[in-house]
Structures are given as C-alpha cells and as structure tokens.
Image (tube, rainbow, N blue to C red):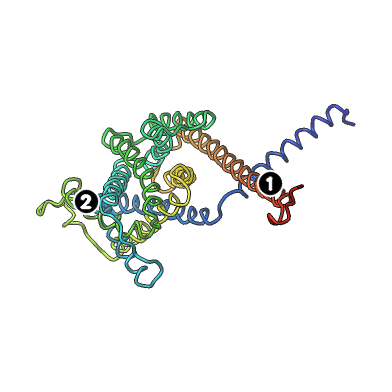
Amino acid sequence: PASPRSSGFLGDEDSAGKGALSKMKRNLAAADWKVFSFMMVNFFSSAGIVITNKLLMERFHFNFATTLTFIHFVCTFVLLLTVSAFGLYQMKELPLGPTSKLAATSMGFVLLTNLSLQYNSVGFYQIMKVMTTPMIVLIEAVLYKKFLERKLRFALLPICLGVILTASTDFRLNLTGTIFAISSVVVTSFYQIWSGALQKGLDADALQLQTYNAPLSALFIMPLLPVFDNYMVKDPNAIWSFPFNPLNSSLIFLTGLIAFLVNVSIFLVIGKSSALTYNILGHGKTCVIILSDFILFGRPLDVKGISGVALALGGVFWYTHLKLEKARLEKEAKVQESELSDLDSEKFDMGKPESNDEVRRPR
C-alpha cells in the first residue's frame, strides 16, 4: 500500500494536472469564436496558397512569381466586385493617401513572399516567416514605444534560435533567397501593423479596405513585372513561351481564388484582433506547411534542421499560451470591474432620497 506521503504527492500531481487543464479551458473559453472562424478561413487558405504556389513553380515550372502575384491581386478585386454585386457588403469611399500607403506595403509583402517561396525551400520560407512576430515586437518598441512584457519577450528567444538553426542547415540555402526572405519579414511586419490601425482608423471593414488595396497593389506591381520575371519576346524561357494548358491554367486560377480568401481573411483577423494574434495563427500554419515540405517537396530528414523547427514551434506554442492567458485575465478583470461598478451604483441608488421634497430640514 502507498504511504500517506506518496499518496499526497500523487494527489498533488493530479491536482496540478487538473489545474493546468482547467486553466487551458478557461483560456479557450475567453477566446472570441467569431475571430476564431476568421482565423480558420485564413489557416486553410494560407496553407493552401503556399502548397499550390509551390506546386505550380516546382511541378509545372511556372517560375514567374511577380506575375502570379499580379494575377492574385486582380482575382481578389474581381471577386470583391462580384461579392458586392450580390449585395453581401457595401462599398465605401476611402481616402487614397492612406490606402495607397497600405497597398504599397501589401504589394511588397505578397511579392517578396512569393519570391522567397520561389528561391527557397518550403521549410526555410515558412520558418523565416516565424520571424515576423519578433520583428513586429521590435518595430512597435522602437517606433511606437509599445513594449512587450518580460515573459513574452523570453518566449520569443527559442523562436529566434530555432529559425537560426533551421536556416544554417537548410538544404537549399542561397543568398538571393535569404535576401528575399529577410526583406519579406520586414515589409510584412509593417503591412500587418498598418493594416490593423488603418482599418480601425477609417472605420472600414475588411472587404471595403481590400476593395481599394487589391487594385492599387496590382497597379503598383505592373512596372515590376519585366524586372523580376522574364518578358523577353524571343527568349524560350520567357512567359510568352510557357506551355499553358487546361491543367496548369486551372491551377493558376485556383491560386487566385485561394489568394482572395487569404487577402480578405488577413484583414478580418487583424481588424478584429491584432497583428500579433495574426502571427500566432501563422505559426500553426507553419506546422502544416513544413510537413508538406517533407511529404511533397523532398526535404531530407536532418536532425539539426528538425531540432530547429521543433525549437521554434516550441517557442511559438509557449508564446501563444502566454497571450491566451493574458487575454483571459484581462477579460476576467473587466468583468469583475463591471460587476463592482454595478454593485456600487445599486448601493448609491438605495441610499439616495427619491426627491428633494422628502428631505425635511429642522426649524
């Protein structure tokens, strides 16, 4: 039979396990399920766009990332007009200055992301995107004096170390791809910070803002098409010589449809939460996309590389847990504050005389 001491120890362990599970349940219960549904749309569409884009580049040899980006913006705009025609949302007139600034960063974000995907392995491309969270924290601290709590900063350390370890062991590491990946992280961070602020500042919903963003981004990217892609008329490797057929054309159209879902869901998630929440979601997509690199694109099973990915994702999940717990505690504090305020108001009303006529002064 177990001694009383060992029995108490096991009881403490059991109690601790139940406490952790209860805390996790409370964290999830504090989440906004409307935002969660937007996050799921973004999760599946973002994972889908990476895999279909890479299949198009690797299997069908459509190595025209800038042109593909242009097609995505055009498809997004056309589908937005279609959705508006059916009365699913009302278009709103917005100032061109702020929306043009956002469109320029949007164009840079998508273009550099696709170029990074073209020149890097899927694993390196995706693990570099994890660095967007630390970059947002750095930008907000330096430019906006918005500082992260100490324990959240510590959670970013394994993410950065994991990315460094993964990058140093990547089987397709190259200078051009690394430059595109780093540039993509910086531009993406500014895009995500500005998109949330602009959406709230203009009082515009995701579809209204994207109606301006998509065509302006397509317009800004047009001069870059012959710079990054081969548009030489007589060159056999140019886009004019690409053997279009029903299969690869359908896949290109499919990427445009998925891009529409990605572009709209980005604004939905960031507009209803924050840029950091959007990046926490992105880390979940990382697991699926890196897995596709092993299954579909021949990434070798390397101990150091896998360790780097595991370290980065461990930091991601730790950071996510801390953010959820913080959100839950803030929500509970607001509820308690509201209840105390209502209670004080009731006590004040009970002690207050009904009218001045009821107050009698002694003569």
Total number of numbered discs in the rendering: 2
Amino acid type indicated by mark 2: Phe
Residue at 67% x, 48% y: name it: 339
Left or right: where does residue 59 sit relative to residue 39?
left
Query: Dividing the picture into quarters, in which one does residue 249 lie?
Result: bottom left
Residue at far right of view:
1
Amino acid type indicated by mark 1: Asp
Q: Secondary structure at mark 2?
A: helix
Left or right: where does residue 177 sit relative to residue 283?
left
Gap in angstroms between the C-alphas marked 1 and 2:
57 Å
Residue 336: x %, y % from top left? 66, 45
Residue 18: x %, y % from top left? 73, 41
Residue at far bottom of view:
86
Residue 80: x %, y % from top left? 34, 64
Residue 314: x %, y % from top left? 53, 35
Q: Residues within 10 Å of mark 1 (few under 14, many from 20)?
A: few
Question: Closer to the observer: label 1 or label 2?
Answer: 1
* Residue labelled with disc 2: 220
